[in-house]
Structures are given as structure tokens and as C-alpha cells.
Image: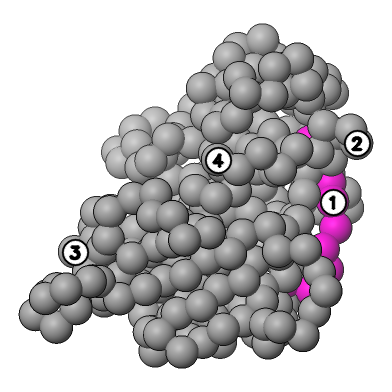
Amino acid sequence: MIDVTLYLAPVTVRLRAPFGTVRHHLETFYPDALRPSGRTGNFIDFDIRIAHGTGWRRWLRPQARFLLDNTEPFLPLPASQAAPLFEWGLNWCLASRPLGYLVMHAAVVARDGDALVMPGSPGAGKSTLCAALTFIDQWQLLSDELAILAPESGSLQPNPRPISLKNESIDIVARFPGARLGRRYADTRKGTISHAAPPAASRTVARQARCRWVIFPRFTPGSAPRCEAIGRAEAFARIAEQSFNRDRMGDTGFHALCGMLDKARCFDIAYDSTETALVMVRDITGR
């Protein structure tokens, strides 16, 4: 049984799990965040357990269950997927719990305090492009899945967890210089998945950043490259659709998103290769 506290800015997580695969996942991807539980007076934001299935399923068809504060918000998964279940469940916690942050489905990378936000629906290529910017162009990774915005300061918070990769993107990212991937999990609800460890600089240098660019990426095989500037009003509407809690935050969420976009340049890009996308981003950001 593993029982540890993870310091994952901006939250603190207690995790208990009996699965060896979860222990290996933590040792691979969170070496700087691990602390033994019970030795800190810090407030715990999320008390998570990854538990065995109950009854006969524990032995004949082993399952992994996700519990937050002893409640089970969704159905179990096969025990072989216990580690991805932790990552998916933690995303759910960050998106659904009222922490005072505006949370959006977007990747975020930064350089010199300037952040590039990339909202994207599943399959758009967001994670692959995020990994390319991180490993090839040396941007700081703030987050692969969730943009976390502090309304008071207007700053995007670092939450550099493993980059989640699916299907064909796994082999693409595995070839990037410095990329270190974990095991592959086949037959998940998203196909085959794996995770890439953030570079050490992203894990150890937790710097907030302010949004300067918003790019909506779309990978389309065989298509002609296209880069189109869009207005902030259109960007607001599209990001609002990717926000998990803007409506719940009311005026605070509305003004926070407006403030994030106030000085941002916004673009819609379509591309047929990662190399083409990197050239587009370099042209847009001048970096």
C-alpha cells in the first residue's frame, strides 16, 4: 500500500493505493512531489484512494476504483488501468471542485512569463503540439490538460503533470529529444495511451504566467496549412465552451476570462504535421 502526499501546485493531494503500477507511476512522474503522508500539517485539497474492486470482481476480473473523500464519482476501470485512472480522476477533481480558480480544457506553455494557451477538443492534436513545444522548442510546461487561471491576479498557474498521449501521438513524441515515456495502456476508453514526463525545468521551476497568445490547433492529415487570426470575442465563446466552471463562478469567471484575453492575440491553425505546427507557432509568437 502506498500512502503519500503530492504537492502539485496549486493543490495538495493525499493518495492511497495498493497497486504496484500506481507506485511505479508516481516514482516515474512525480519524484519531486512525493512526501510520506501523516508528516505534514498542510491542508489536503483532495483525499484520493485508488482501491480494489469489491466482491468476486476483486479476484476474477480485477478492477480499480477511484474514491474522493470516500465517495465514488464514476465507474471502476480494469485494474491494469489503475495509474491512468488516477490521472483522469485528478483532472476531474481539479475541474469540478470549487477551488477559486477558473479551469479550462487547454494546454498551457510559457516562456519568460508569457503564456501560450491551446484549447482543443479530443483528437485536435493539442497534447502532441504541447509536447513538441516543450521538448523541441524548450517552452516551460504549465499544463497539458487544464489551464488554471487565478481570477485575482489574472495569472495562469503551473500544474506540470505528465503529458497524456494517445494512439499515434505516442510514437511521435517518443522520438522527441529528451522525451521520457512511461508504459503503454491498451484498450482504454481513449484507445492506447501513455504519458510523457515533463522536463526537469518544468517540474522544479513553478512560475506563473500571463496569457499572451491563444491558439486553437487542429491536426488534419493531408490538409493545406492554414493560420487565421480571430477576434477575442470569438475566442471567448470558444474557450467558454471548454471551461468547466465559468458558469458556476458567475461574474468572477466571466471577468477572469475577459481579463485573460484582454491583451492576447488569438489564432486558429490547421496543419498536417507537427513540424508545420511548430513553424506556425514560431511565426505567431516570435519565439
Would residue 209 be found to the left or right of residue 245 on screen?
A: right
Callout 2: helix, strand or loop? loop
Q: What's the distance in space between the residues labelled 3 and 1, CA to CA? A: 36 Å
In the picture of the structure, the residue carrying the numbered disc 4 is: 96
Graded by Cα atoms within 10 Å as few (under 14), some (14 to 19) or many (20 or more), the crowding at tag 2 reads few
Callout 3: helix, strand or loop? strand
Question: At x 60% / y 29%, what residue is drawn?
Answer: 245
In the picture of the structure, the residue carrying the numbered disc 1 is: 208
In the picture of the structure, the residue carrying the numbered disc 3 is: 187
In the picture of the structure, the residue carrying the numbered disc 2 is: 153
First in sequence, mark 3 or 2: give its number: 2
- Give, as a single range, the part of the protein colored magenta: 203-211
Magenta span contains residue 204: yes
Would residue 168 be found to the left or right of residue 180 on screen?
A: left
Q: What's the distance in space between the residues labelled 3 and 4, CA to CA? A: 26 Å
Query: Which of the two discs, 3 and 4, sits closer to the camera?
Result: 4
Graded by Cα atoms within 10 Å as few (under 14), some (14 to 19) or many (20 or more), the crowding at tag 3 reads few
- Foreground residue among 127 and 237: 237
Graded by Cα atoms within 10 Å as few (under 14), some (14 to 19) or many (20 or more), the crowding at tag 1 reads many
- Foreground residue among 54 and 259: 54
Magenta span contains residue 247: no
Q: Position of residue 139 (x, y in %)?
A: 72, 58
The quarter of the picture where residue 257 lies is top right
Q: In this orientation, does residue 246 appear?
A: yes
